[in-house]
Image: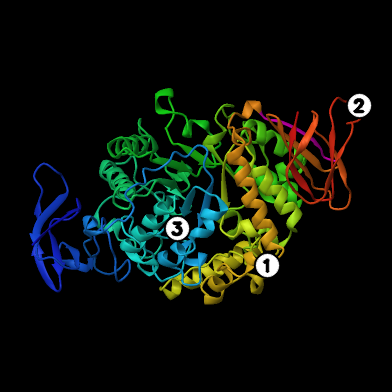
Amino acid sequence: MSRYEVWAPQASRVEVEIEGSRFHLEPVPGRAGWWHGTAPAGDYAFRLDGAGPALPDPRSARQPFGPDGPSRPVDHDAFRWSESRWRGRPLPGAVLYELHVGTFTPAGTFDAAAARLDHLVDLGVDFVELMPVSPFPGRHGWGYDGVSLWAVHEPYGGPDGLKRFVDTAHRKGLGVVLDVVHNHLGPSGNHLPAFGPYFTDRHHTPWGSAVNLDAPGSDEVREYLIGSALAWLRDYRIDGLRLDAVHALVDTRAVHFLEQLATEVDRLAAATSRPLFLIAESDLNDPRTTTPRQCGGQGITAQWSDDLHHALHAALTGESRGYYGDFAREPLAALAKVLTGGWFHDGSWSSSRGRSHGRPFPTGYGHRLLGYLQTHDQVGNRALGDRLSAALGPGPLAAGAALVLTSPFTPMLFMGEEWGAGTPWQYFTDHTDPGLAEAVRQGRRREFAEHGWQAENIPDPQAPATVLASTLDWSEPARQPHAALLDWYRTLIRLRRAHPELGDGDLGAVRVRHDERERWLVVHRGPYRVAVNLDPTEARAVPLGGRYDGVLAAFGGYEPSAEEPGAPGDALVLAPQACAVVRTA
């Protein structure tokens, strides 16, 4: 016999159904809304008030037949972990690698991804950041439409597949971060409203009614989400969580949900002697997200910083539409501001928002911001899912990599970026509801038609060809020009490790000189200089602000110049679209 329990405060009768037989559950004394009881072990579902379909357990650890099917118990203690030496590692000083399981390899499984981890070891990254793996309808999707927040997508390999991946990663010295979504559930397969007030109409988000974090019943909803987060860290030995779009977590309570979550994660870290951490995705540009709780903040370890991406993208491509507009006016000045201040929008006017935005970031804590050249969002939310490599040659890509991997931020790469992947990464879904599938297809076309795109040119999210096109081509890294760019990424990561000044998170110690007209920029990192020439046709003499003492690494042609005109120190002449990491005396 097994024990079953569920929170269903709106029900007057609850049964657990196992292989067609129903067993009555009883109210739990002292736990309002909870029901429990014993019944035979097996695949199970709950029936509420004797009506409607049998529903999967909201806390199900496995959905072998998809989000609408019965739940299956998982004995987490039964898994045989082979790696017992891994004790984790802190986030500061690390390099992350964002990976989508379904398109990292043609097989699209945890086991297939694990077989490619040696590539990441050779690259030199420290953590693999998995995009969401909770179940969603169909086989293919980004993962942000997950609906069973304690379970693992079965086509990827289910719970044991994820554990095998984590075990293999740890054995190879790689940590694992998991992207989790607490701000909404997918539009299909979400059965939580039948059980209780998991959502509230007090607040609204882009996905509809908000997750209930502050209305009646919210204590249990918060415990549900926090319990899910702790289960990933405890049962699957995940090292950290990336929290999707935390600005959409509407919470008016005195103790914000993020603060409560961070407190519980810290308790688990202390209990397990592992340095667990949280990374928030937030577009608020509010340093309180990562300020320690004892200093009045929410205590999240780090957060994504789109401002570095936007500044780099505008500088490298010249793109100026939408939110790139503010950065594109003087892109090198924008980049200099981000590299020395953390954010571009630190209370400044944001034309895309029509208001001022953000507040200043504390200068000593650059490692609390993740810096990146590309992400799943910034690639996949483009009309064609085109990577930077679709528009730029190896030189600008190398320059962007140099500025990220020697920045004061915690660097993150997006899978395939390291070799300038020729494959796009497009928006794809596999909705099993025909009406929903068509709505998503037409909605995507309407969205980009407003920006001048023809409907027939927008990839069909439901088409298998869209997933296939987005899958990495593993023959590319061995071919030029991909191989040279891959070697450059490896070199930069090695330099970041070998020379601590190149990874120093003190924003106040960073100095940047640039020339918008001549298109060069040089970043001062202690005795080192990261010099880039973005001019596509002209060589440029980049002032070093010190005596030239050798090049640690370069992509493209260069030669030292004896004197920097009008100022003490030497210069480095960089060929068009070349970059170098230089030591000065």
Image: 530 above or below 104? above
Residue sitting at x 55%, y 68%: 471
Q: Which of marks 3 and 1 is nearer the N terminus?
A: 3
Q: Earlier in the sequence, mark 1 or mark 2?
A: 1
Mark 2, secondary structure of its residue: loop
Q: Earlier in the sequence, mark 3 or mark 2?
A: 3
Q: Residue type at mark 1?
A: Arg
Please name whichever residue, 351 or 463, is drawn nearer the observer in this view of the structure: 463
Viewport quadrant of the N terminus? bottom left
Q: Is the magenta stretch mostly helix, strand or loop?
A: strand
Q: In which quarter of the image is residue 552?
A: top right
Mark 2 = which residue? 566
Q: Residue type at mark 2?
A: Gly
What residue span does the magenta drawing correspond to? 510-517
User: Which of the two marks, 3 or 2, is nearer to us in this view?
Assistant: 2
Residue sitting at x 72%, y 63%: 481
